[in-house]
Image: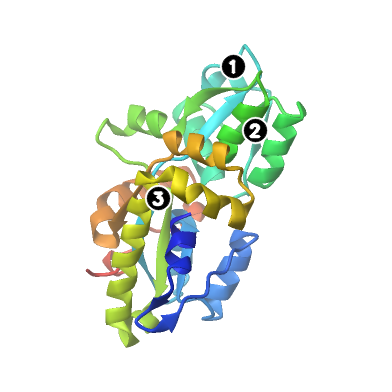
Amino acid sequence: TPLFKFSGDGTLNGAKIELVLYKSVEEATTRIAKGEADFTVLPLNVAAKLYNKQVDISLANVSTWGILYLLTTDSQVTEWQDLEGKELYVGAQGSSPDVLTQYFMSKNGMKAGDIKLAYLSSPEIAQLMINGLANNVVLPEPQATQVLMNNSQARIARDFYEDWQDFEGKDAKLPQAGMVVRNEFARSYPKAVTEFQNVYKSAVEWTVANPAEAAPLAFSNMNIPPPVFIKSMEKTRLFFASGPEAREDVNIYLSRLLDISPDMVGGILPDEKFFLAD
């Protein structure tokens, strides 16, 4: 929604802003590889993977810090271990819901296969649970709230952000998604990048402060009913941090994923040039 506010407000240094909504992470990464997107929002592990494949990008900012929940209609499920042998629907393979689910499985002494992971898109998973066809799901906001408002049997079993802090410490933040910029664009138009960062930061802060005013943007662009969006903001942790400001939390996050499976982040921890300098 901050992006809809941002793009709807007009131009950047006189240049018109074109906002493209991707259907999948694969579509986004293809456009980045072809140099067709100047700024792109990505799961942080995907951004690191691209960087490690020598794609010329930098992490400009992080604004999504914990919007994932484990929902269940099963009265027996309260802990991660309670899912052993059960089916769990999770968003796209390799995405934030998937890699974090695997992190929590590992931290709770479970191994691959202990939970039967089924991959679908988050909107598809939400519809399954609303229709009573899925008992255990991992969903981000606002889909989590959409389910809770439409299935009285559904409840939150685990908050990923709180579980992350249980393992990483109470001061740890959970950086899920960030925005990368093409370095060629950043080199050619440094003032535009600075203005972009400032305007986007304002849009994030405006969305958090004004959920009722932001709701129509979410409805017109993503068909999320305003009551769902407004309620979902209570469980949505959004705040703007520049690449350097987010560096420590991002490195901890990527390091933990590396421990589980190096392929999740492209084999190594990105070097300092991954973070766009202020």
Mark number displayed over residue 207: 3
Residue 185 x %, y %: 38, 82
**Label 3 environment density (alpha carbons within 10 Å; few <14, some 14–19, many ≥20):** many
- Do the residues bearing badges 3 and 2 touch, measured as CB atoms within 8 Å? no
Q: Is residue 275 visible?
A: no
Q: CA distance from mark 1 to mark 3?
A: 34 Å
Give the vertical position of 131 relative to 52 (above or below). Answer: above
Q: Is residue 237 toward the left or the right of residue 82 in the image?
A: left
Gap in Å between the C-alphas at discs 3 and 2? Answer: 39 Å
Q: Is residue 133 above or below residue 61?
A: above
Against 167, is 54 above or below? below
Tell me if residue 78 comes above or below residue 179 in the rendering: above
At horizontal 63% and vertical 59% (from top left) the residue drawn is: 24
The amino acid beneath tag 1 is Val
Query: Nearest the camera: 189 or 207?
Result: 207
Q: Nearer the viewer, mark 3 or mark 2?
A: 3
Front disc: 1 or 2? 1
Q: How many other residues sit within 10 Å of disc 2, few (<14), some (14-19) or many (≥20)? A: few
The residue tagged 2 is 113
Numbered mark located on residue 230 in the image: none
Specify whether residue 178 is in view: yes
As drawn, which residue projects farthest toward the bottom?
Answer: 188
Residue type at tag 2: Gly
Label 3 or label 2, whichever comes before in sequence order: 2
Residue at 60%, 56% in the rendered image: 220
Residue under label 1: 77
Locate residue 136, reporting x and y percent. 65, 27
Q: Choose top left, top right, bottom left or bottom right for residue 193.
A: bottom left
Q: For the residue labelled by badge 3, is the local secondary structure a helix, a strand or a loop?
A: helix
Mark 1 and mark 3 lie on one chain; the one further toward the N terminus is 1
